[in-house]
Amino acid sequence: MQKSLGIQVVKQLLFSRQVAVPQFIHHQGLSYESLKRETKKINASIQAYQIQIELTPQSMSWQGDESSVRIFYHRLLLYFTHTNFFFSDYAIQQANYDRFLNRLERKQLGVQNEVILGTCWFYINIIRQRAQAMIEAFTYDPEDPLYLLYHQDLIQLYGYEGIQLADDELFFAFFCFMDSWNYTVDEQFKQLLRTHYSVLLEKSRLFVHSLSEHYQLPALNNSQLTENITLFLIKYFESRRLLDKFLMEYHDVLVVVQAKFPQLYQWVQEEMRNYRFAGILKASEYANSTAVLLIQTAIYQVAPQKIKVYLVFQGEPAWKSFLAQELQATLGPRVELTTANPDQIQAHDLIIANYTFQPTSPAKIYYVSMVPTPKELDTLRQTIRYLYL
């Protein structure tokens, strides 16, 4: 990793707002033309982040919003958070972030969160501010209840690193912390929503009720979807611009959501277009996809998608019982595997069998050996793959 020219370029641009090109190419032992070619390749690969590296014979620097630069680094370096990539002794910064989370727990302000994701944001914000690469201006509500709950603790956290958070940098740090929050709402956070965001909570409840009627799934009304949608709305109304940018970090997820759940995606899009999604109007594709993921997760929880597969198998009883158990584990939780005789099979079911027979109704039969071969098992997995991601 350290030998990659591309990594050296983006690393230097992480720690410095502007990099002197003559010194850089001398230190790396390369020509300006080589650096120019590498920069062109980097720029082509990061277009989705709406940033580019501007290169001249004298200097190189990032062009684009500072928030977009930090989002790019977060996506690139999240997996290197707990290495020495950011700091020579990252344990100090890690201890400060852990102390921050523990303090919130003691104050009953703790939330379920992705610690590594939040820690990575903390590191990047520290480094960019030390490099004097300041965040652009945002429109936000300084009297927002959630912002007021956490901003003093965030000021203290960054103060440990000698950073004085204020104004736009403080709000951005707050939004980064929110980005690490899980959509797993505990009772403590539910109480926070009821106290400070009762209007949004009610809008979410009405939306979930409409959703439950549309899909004829009344159990959705008693799921955590209402609270999760509320948290999504809070992020949206805190800063729509930032939410879209943060979600853009996962632009590859958008493709999966649109391909996997096209009907639900279209329905959510229509609800937003007609101002029925709790006051959101014409949200971005990224916001739509996040809402779809929250909804689809809840649907799977209250109404698991399952198909019935029959095992028609002749063999030693203990082996048959063991094999049924292993096949169930292999096929996963969205398959209901049942041992049966041929006359018990209904139409449109799948059958796994180890002997030839004529089913009484149309059904797809997959034949396996007494001890199924790897190829036979792979065929079964491919058959039910559509049930999963």
Image: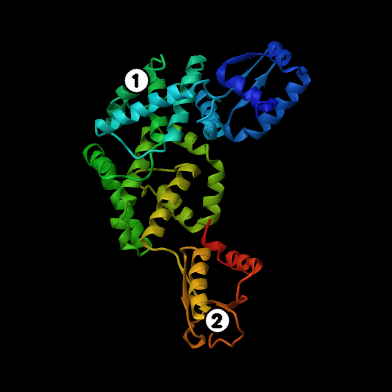
Residue neighbourhood size for the residue with mark 1, other residues' Cα within 10 Å, grouped as few (<14), some (14–19), many (≥20)? some
Looking at the image, which residue is at 40% across and 25% down?
Answer: 95
Kind of element beneath mark 1: helix
The spot of residue 363 in percent (x, y) is 56, 80
SS type, badge 2: loop
Residue 61 seen: yes
In the figure, is residue 320 to the left or right of 370? left
Name the side, left or right, on which 14 lies relative to 156: right
Q: Is residue 302 above or below residue 159?
A: below
Q: Please say whether residue 144 is visible from this viewpoint.
A: no
- Percent x, y for residue 26? 73, 13
Numbered label attached to residue 155: 1
Residue 283, by quadrant, is top left
In the rendered structure, the answer to whether residue 232 lies left or right of residue 22 reads left
| Amino acid on which the number 1 mark rests in the picture | Ile
Instruction: Please give the label number shown on residue 83.
Output: none
Vertical arrangement, residue 223 with respect to residue 356, above or below: above
Q: Tell me the residue at 43%/52% (across/down).
A: 268
Query: Which residue bears the numbered disc 2?
Result: 315
Residue found at x 38% / y 37%: 235
